[in-house]
Structures are given as C-alpha cells and as structure tokens.
Amino acid sequence: MRTVGRGRFAGFWFMGLTAFVVALFVTGPVHAQDYRTLVAAPDRSAADLENDKRRDPIGMLNFVQPRAGMKILDMGAGAGYSTELMARAAGPTGMVYGQNPPDQFERARQAFDERAKSPAMKNAVQDVRPFDDPVPPGVRDLDMVTYLFFYHDTTYLPVDRALMNKRLYDALKPGGILAIADYSARPGDDVSSGKSLHRIDETIVKREVEAAGFKLVAEGDFLRHPEDKRDTPSSRAPMPVDEFILKFEKPR
C-alpha cells in the first residue's frame, strides 16, 4: 500500500510540476503582473511617476525579481525612489534598508525621512552608513542588494570599493543577488569618467565585483540606448543615456 500511495503522489507531483513549467513558459516571469500592479499603485507620488519615465521600473523589477519576505539592502538610496519599490515588492513580511552615507547628501536623507512616513515604507528604514561599511549591525543573510545608478560615484568619493564589495558579499546569503545598474562610459574609459561624466565602463564594475567573489549571472539590455555616444555627462546628454544593468550571485 505504501508503494501504491507513493506512486500516486509521484504522479500528481510530476503532473503539477509539468503544469507549472508550461505555465511559466507561456506567461513569462512569475511576478510580471504583480510588478505592473505594484508600479501602478494609486498611492505612489507624482514625482516617482515622473521618474518612472526614465527608470523603467517594471523592466528593472522583472530583471532583479525581488519577492515577498526578502531582506534587501538598497545602496545609494538617495531620496528613496528605488527603496520604496523594493519595500512594496518585499511586502509586510520583508525588510528593506536604504543606505545613504552620513557625510554627504543631507537633502536626500531628509527627503528619505519624509518618504518614510508613507505606509508603503512601513517595512523600510534609512541606513545611514558609509559605502564601504554599509550593513547595519546584526544584519546578515540578505537576499538581495540593489545598487542603482550610484556605483560610479564611489570612484571619486572616499570609498574603498574592494572593501565595500567584500562586505556586500559577506552580508548576502549563499545564492543572494547583487544587482547593479549605472550609466555607461565608453569601453576602455578609466574610473575618472565617474567624476567627469558621471558614467562608468561596465567592465570595471564586472572586474571589481567578481574580485570580491561574485559570479555574473545575467545582463539586461532593456536600458540600452546605442545612439548615446557616451562622451557627455549623463545628466546633460542630448539623447537618452545608455545604461547597463548586471546581476551577480553569491555562489551557493
């Protein structure tokens, strides 16, 4: 009887798995519709909706795949645009830390504190710590770190990037994700383009992050604009800026 029971269970399990795989193949990313609903939430601010036009939040969320219950560190959070998106995705059972340095960007930190009053930010806190020591005491086994459009700034700020990347690696659980998006410099440009053009060559990011132990697992092309010559400051480019997004994993 036990053998028969196990056989039935195995059959049901196989049919269920097959149905799941077929559904995934047909419908695409599991959370795609959820992310559209999240971004369309009626309580998002007018400023964030305007920011959406250049940030493609649905593309970013589909690529990064934050999920309910995750612990997430959002590096270079600024006023908290991406922190709030992560907080909405992580939901009430998750936790999001929005990192900002203590010695810079006071106006951004104040704007983050104002945003924190929103119900959407109940599961998020501002993490005022240096870039190269970003993880709050006692926080470990993070599921994800997002680092959106700010890595280039650490090339001219007093930041030990090797130490920063090692601490992010140590804070993530095995299989945890580090997602980095930034403004593209020309291939071969050195780190000085971080200050002069507010851009960075993505090969520099790959080299530095992989040196900390991460493995590159995906590259997104939905932010690409090949018409951008990458020779003007990203904030003053006369056309849409070419941007890259990379997904790294801490090996299991």
Image: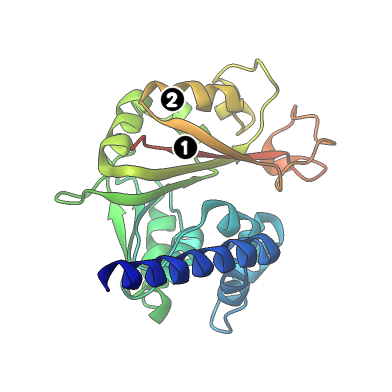
Give the SS element for disc 2.
helix
Q: Do the residues labelled 2 and 1 touch (CB within 8 Å)?
A: yes
Inspect the image, locate mark 2, and give the three-letter code of the amino acid beneath it. Answer: Glu
Q: Where is residue 3 in the image (x, y as percent from the top left)?
A: 30, 66
Residue 158 — which label? none
Q: Residue at x 78, y 45 (%)?
A: 240
Farthest residue, direction bottom: 42
Q: Residue at x 45, y 62 (%)?
A: 86
The N terminus lies in quadrant: bottom left
Q: Which of marks 2 and 1 is nearer the N terminus?
A: 2
- The quarter of the image holding the C terminus is top left
Q: Nearer the viewer, residue 219 or 131?
A: 219
Residue 229 appearing in the image: yes
Bin the neighbour count of mark 1 within 10 Å (Cα to Cα): few under 14, some 14-19, many 20 and up. Answer: many
Query: Of helix, strand and loop, which one carries label 1?
Result: strand
Point out residue 50 in the picture as x, y percentages from the top left corner. Answer: 67, 67
Left or right: where 49 falls relative to 170 = right
Q: In which quarter of the image is residue 109?
A: bottom left
Determine which quarter of the picture holds residue 123.
bottom left
Image location (x, y in percent) of residue 103: 32, 43
Q: How crowded is mark 2: few (under 14 residues within 10 Å), some or many (20 or more)?
A: some
Give the residue pinned by disc 1: 248
In the rendered image, residue 159, in percent from the top left (x then y), is placed at 35, 29
Q: What residue did someone put label 2 on?
A: 210
Gap in Å between the C-alphas at discs 2 and 1? 8 Å
Look at 82% across and 42% down and name the residue there: 238
**Is residue 75 rendered to the left or right of residue 230?**
left
